[in-house]
Image: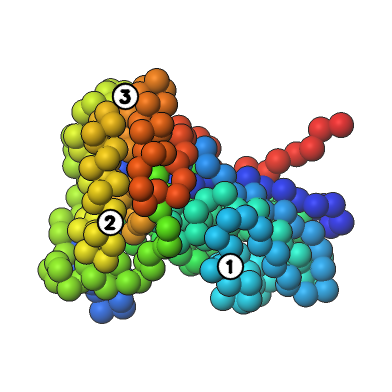
Amino acid sequence: MTTSAVVRVRVPAKINLALCVGPRADDGFHPLGTVFEAVNLFDEVLLWPADEVNLNIVGEGVDAVPTGPENLAAKAFALLAARYTLPAPGVHLEIRKSIPVAGGMAGGSADAAATLLAVNEWAGLGMDAEELRSHAAELGSDVPFALLGGVALGTGRGDHVMPIMQRGHHHWVLAFSEGGLSTPAVYGRFDELVPDGRDVDVPDAMIDALAAGDVERLASTLRNDLQEAALDLRPDLQKILDAGQRAGALAGIVSGSGPTCAFLCRNEDAAVRVSAALGAEPGIVGVRRVHGPVPGARIIREHA
């Protein structure tokens, strides 16, 4: 238990290599088959005790992030506070964001996962990885994977995660555009465009390509069933996808519900070239080279 010290957690963004979306169920959710990859674009969450829950969020685009009880990190604390005796009635959470807000890379889910891990450490709750992921699944579909990291298969609502054997590293270029996309809006448009949903089985060819470490085969299997809906709401994203292909990416895909576009490249040199080309494209407000897979949420310990 570290009741007075600051607990610091670093948590990665995710890219969906596959996002297979079934029909909307009566409870409003969609069955999913997805393959997640964690990449080295991180948020950090710092926690220390307080008399009440306070959130301070810093970084680009954070004006759109709620700071009240509806924030997913605040919900993560409230969930544990309702079930465990904690050393203080509240905490101060400082969330340092690098993952784009409303960008389809699960930034809010990542912050919730980091908060669960931070509270577990601060309060000395002693939860193991399975217990943490069980709580995470109650908060949102992407939260369990943010704890796990690496490459994983997600089923159910995406919240049942299992590591996938894979070889090598993948080099990606991320292209950010102005404004975000609401995940509920994208799913709503998907329901209008594809009322019966699609098959939620992740392609075997993708699993085989990951196991073989064959990036070209992997590129040919990338799939996002939400991409059509995202492009319908944001037609400008197609120009970004086309630009990445012209620049030499093996494949480009809208990340999750968008609007971030992710381009898989053959190697680091290719990623440098694609990044430079996309940086000169109109409509792109930022470009970032990242690689994966990387581990999930981790406590950062200060060394003297």
Q: Measuring from the top left, give residue 198's x and y in whole percent.
A: 15, 59
Q: Secondary structure at mark 2?
A: helix
Amino acid found under the numbered disc labelled 2: Asp
Q: Which residue is mark 1?
A: 63
Q: Amino acid at mark 1?
A: Asp
Taking depth in this image into account, of 35 and 284 the one nearest to the observer is: 284
Badge 2 vs badge 3, beta-carbon distance below 8 Å = no
In the shown orientation, is residue 204 left or right of residue 252?
A: left
First-in-chain label (1 vs 3): 1
Q: Which quarter of the picture shows residue 160?
A: bottom left
Q: Which residue is mark 2?
A: 236
Q: Is residue 24 above or below residue 4?
A: below
Question: Disc 2 vs disc 1: Cβ atoms closer than 8 Å?
Answer: no
Quadrant in which the C terminus appears:
top right
Residue 275 found in image quarter: top left
Question: Where does residue 91 sit, x and y in percent of width and height?
Answer: 76, 66
Q: Nearer the viewer, mark 2 or mark 1?
A: 2
Residue linked to disc 3: 266
